[in-house]
């Protein structure tokens, strides 16, 4: 298929490309760079007016990455790795977005990205053996589609009664206005206490006059201990980058912690040694804390021992025992995505901050002047919805994808997402998902997972071209076995024991299925073995 364009019957332009990538976040940008290098005629469609994906949209106060800067970056070009200077232990959103823009400029990516282009339909044409993508800027026809649409890219705003009657301003953390928001002198309500809220609340509390947080489920959070990045540390990383990256890829979440992860069992630990070890990990902060013992996510007794340690830290941090009690979680620790914070719990000691527990009496409605719970109105000038995302499947399903014989993706995924390797879907030939459901994705350093998927897809497309293969499609049996495998692995852990977006349980009506696969290194082995075996589990024609 060669590149070209013309006018379609509805007056819109019509374009022909070999590969269409949807999304210009970290996945889409690298996919374009990689495919261009292999000589594929590729175009990227992006609904935003800039690159960066999640880092383009999530501009809320305090937004930063929970994976440390030296690891949350591309590894594909050693020169890029050496040239870019990170300034903090964890990069802030503006710095990551600057990095994304630098990458786009450095590799001249923008010329093949169609910004402000929203994909509305994606249909497989069985006869022509190509995809047709309808966008608000015309139609694209292409042999291959790569969905690089991100795992957390469809914001979820619950339809609270009266939401449209609110007379103040409303914001979602995942759609924060680019020009920024002046909250000075305002009475602000934040709904939600997930990772975004845990980062935003301490910053918003300093800016506004009065802050009321509406909490449905209290969350565990570990101090991030962010600080300026020591130039010596940065230098050491840069001197050993390839070794350190390779080491990271051998870890289950594909990143290194500051203290080595231990396989020791928390339930067997001597009480003094246990506290001493957890204190050490707590002081280092961040995800390092969770590496103290090997069975945190596996054994309920060990998990509760560790949870109790964190609960005691919350009690120490929060002065008012009633508030501390409300902020204290009792569910499985690290079952929901773990939060990292800077002074989150301490923020509730400030006189201008109050906490409203909505676990038993849910938010009744939103009134013109504020939020009503249990008959009481909490006045607000602005509401911040920190209510998360329709994760992993929301964006894909909203694109109205239909495959072979007109089958809708929504129908195929009626009982939860079904993929083979998180890369392909039976009935949807020549369509790849980067960090799709059924792959480790959100349980890992996302950039490491993205690079692994992009490299695998690029190699696969090269193979198809070399052997003159026109279509590749996940086989139904391989897909069924993979779904069972993803569930079986999840069932060996404590992840399914609470409600989380990993399970889709934050979205009313969404099937409760654990969507990501636990464990990066074994997954990579399986993907590599499938490729080496002639793309086992895929039908090639
Ligand atoms: O969203 P969430 P998030 N009434 O779904 C509450 C990534 N991330 O944007 O727990 C009242 O975690 C909901 O309550 P509950 C990271 O992977 C990364 O914070 O469902 N409350 C919860 O408290 C993260 O996990 C980073 O009971 C309602 C909150 O809203 C993911 O993004 C930073 C409600 C939603 O929490 C999502 O995090 C930030 C209702 N009707 C985020 N509906 C970095 O690494 C929902 N809630 C930088």
Image (cartoon, grey):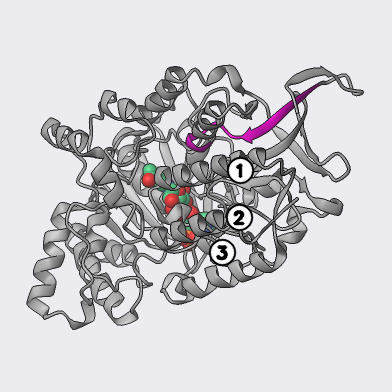
Few, some or many residues within 10 Å of mark 1 (<14, 14–19, 20+): some
The structure residue drawn at horizontal position 33% and vertical position 46%, both measured from the top left corner, is: 66
Name the spot of residue 499 as percent of width and height, x first: 49, 67
Of all residues, the one furthest to the front in this rendering is 467
Task: Quickly name the residue at label 3.
Answer: 505
Q: Is residue 420 magenta?
A: no
Which of the 4 image quadrants contains residue 200?
top left
The structure residue drawn at horizontal position 21% and vertical position 67%, both measured from the top left corner, is: 262
Q: Residue 463 bears which disc, if any?
A: 1
Which of the 4 image quadrants contains residue 181?
top left
Contact (Cβ within 8 Å) of mark 2 with mark 1: yes
Q: Secondary structure at mark 3?
A: loop
Q: What secondary structure predominates along the stretch shown in magenta? A: strand
Marks 1 and 3: which is nearer the front?
1
Residue 507 vertical placement versus 371 (above, below):
below
- The tag earlier along the polypeptide, 2 or 1, is 1
Q: Nearer the viewer, residue 521 or 538?
A: 538
Q: Is mark 3 within 8 Å of ligand 1?
A: yes
Q: Nearer the viewer, residue 54 or 249?
A: 249
Name the spot of residue 23 as percent of width and height, x first: 59, 34
The structure residue drawn at horizontal position 62% and vertical position 34%, both measured from the top left corner, is: 21
Name the spot of residue 147 as percent of width and height, x first: 62, 42
Give, as a single range, the part of the protein colored magenta.
14-27
Q: In the picture provided, is 356 more to the left or to the right than 513? A: left
């Amino acid at each position: 298929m060669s590149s070209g364009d013309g006018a379609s019957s509805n007056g819109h332009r019509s374009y022909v490309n070999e590969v269409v990538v949807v999304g210009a976040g970290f996945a889409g940008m690298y996919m374009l760079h990689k495919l261009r290098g292999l000589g594929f005629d590729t175009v990227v469609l992006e609904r935003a007016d800039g690159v960066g994906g999640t880092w383009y949209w999530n501009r809320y106060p305090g937004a930063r990455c929970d994976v440390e800067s030296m690891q949350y970056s591309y590894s594909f070009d050693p020169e890029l790795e050496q040239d870019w200077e990170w300034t903090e232990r964890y990069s802030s959103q503006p710095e990551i977005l600057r990095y994304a823009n630098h990458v786009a400029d450095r590799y001249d990516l923008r010329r093949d990205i169609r910004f402000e282009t929203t994909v509305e339909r994606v249909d497989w044409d069985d006869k022509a053996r190509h995809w047709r993508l309808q966008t608000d800027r015309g139609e694209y026809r292409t042999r291959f589609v790569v969905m690089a649409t991100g795992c957390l890219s469809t914001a979820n705003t619950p339809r609270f009664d009266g939401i449209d009657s609110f007379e103040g301003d409303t914001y979602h953390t995942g759609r924060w206005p680019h020009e920024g928001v002046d909250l000075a002198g305002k009475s602000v309500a934040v709904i939600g206490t997930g990772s975004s809220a845990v980062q935003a609340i301490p910053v918003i509390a300093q800016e506004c006059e009065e802050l009321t947080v509406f909490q449905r489920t209290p969350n565990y959070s570990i101090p991030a201990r962010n600080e300026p990045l020591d130039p010596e540390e940065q230098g050491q990383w840069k001197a050993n980058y390839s070794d350190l990256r390779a080491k990271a890829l051998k870890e289950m979440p594909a990143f290194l912690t500051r203290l080595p992860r231990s396989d020791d069992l928390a339930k067997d630990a001597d009480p003094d040694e246990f506290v001493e070890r957890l204190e050490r990990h707590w002081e280092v902060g961040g995800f390092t804390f969770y590496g103290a013992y090997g069975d945190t996510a596996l054994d309920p007794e060990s998990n509760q021992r560790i949870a109790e340690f964190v609960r005691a830290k919350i009690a120490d941090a929060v002065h008012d025992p009633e508030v501390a009690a409300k902020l204290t979680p009792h569910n499985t620790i690290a079952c929901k995505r773990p939060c990292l914070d800077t002074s989150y719990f301490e923020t509730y000691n400030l006189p201008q901050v109050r906490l409203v527990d909505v676990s038993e009496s849910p938010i009744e409605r939103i009134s013109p002047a504020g939020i009503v719970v249990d008959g009481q109105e909490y006045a607000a000038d602005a509401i911040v919805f920190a209510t998360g995302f329709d994760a992993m499947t929301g964006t894909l399903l909203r694109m109205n994808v239909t495959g072979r014989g007109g089958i809708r993706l929504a129908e195929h995924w009626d009982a939860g997402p079904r993929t083979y390797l998180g890369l392909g879907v039976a009935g949807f030939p020549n369509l790849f998902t980067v960090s799709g459901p059924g792959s480790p994705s959100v349980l890992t350093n996302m950039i490491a997972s993205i690079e692994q998927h992009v490299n695998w897809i690029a190699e696969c497309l090269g193979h198809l071209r070399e052997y003159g293969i026109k279509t590749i499609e996940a086989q139904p049996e391989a897909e069924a076995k993979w779904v069972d495998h993803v569930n079986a692995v999840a069932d060996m852990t404590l992840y399914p024991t609470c409600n989380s977006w990993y399970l889709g349980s934050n979205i009313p009506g969404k099937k409760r299925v654990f969507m990501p696969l636990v464990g990066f290194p074994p997954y990579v082995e399986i993907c590599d073995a499938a490729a080496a075996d002639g793309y086992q589990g895929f039908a090639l024609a």
